[in-house]
Image: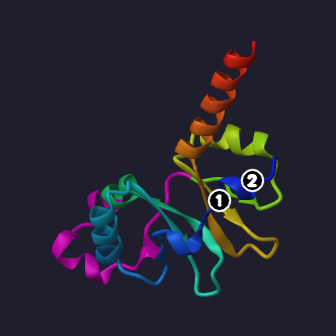
Amino acid sequence: MNIAFFLTPKSELIYEMVDSTMRQVLERMEHHGYSAIPLIDNDGKYVGTLTEGDLLWKIKNTPGLSFRNTNKVKVKDIERRKKHEVVTISADINNIIVLARTQNFVPVVDDEGVFIGIIKRSDIIDYCYNLITDEKKIG
């Protein structure tokens, strides 16, 4: 099965640029209720995923940093503690299922590394659930 079927395109997503500030990403994540957000560079390439945990560790480990001055910290200067695996649009569905076990979403890039969207864990679970229930109806 082609993974494009599961793709939520970049145009429908919330993501952040690496040149944004910590305050901007905090407010965007809060507004949309996300615990993780894809990061892209000025060329549109996926560079990683920033999580709430990354933000908390940055505050904890930076003397004098509080919410008030998070506008002075660039997203690119925040250490990301977990590497989210990325796939190309030509990836096999089995690879996506394996990654979705440990990631809320799987970032998808084109052959040039340009971010084109994500595949959400919930969409994979729905797909697998439908396969199981369809087999029960047939068998």
Residue 134: x, y in percent?
68, 25
Query: Considering depth in this image, is 88 or 129 the residue closer to the camera?
Result: 129
Residue 87: x, y in percent?
73, 57
**Residue that label 1 marks:** 7
Amino acid bearing label 1: Leu
**The C terminus, quarter of image:** top right
**Of all residues shown, which one is farthest toward the front?**
138
In the image, is 83 to the left or to the right of 78?
Answer: right
In the structure shown, which secondary structural element does the residue marked by tag 2 occupy?
helix
Q: Is residue 75 magenta?
A: yes
Kindly tell me whether residue 101 is visible in this rendering. Answer: no
Q: How many marks on residues?
A: 2
The answer to whether mark 2 and mark 1 are in CB contact below 8 A is yes
Amino acid bearing label 2: Ile
What stretch of residues is rendered in magenta? Answer: 58-82
The quarter of the picture where residue 66 lies is: bottom left
**Residue that label 2 marks:** 3
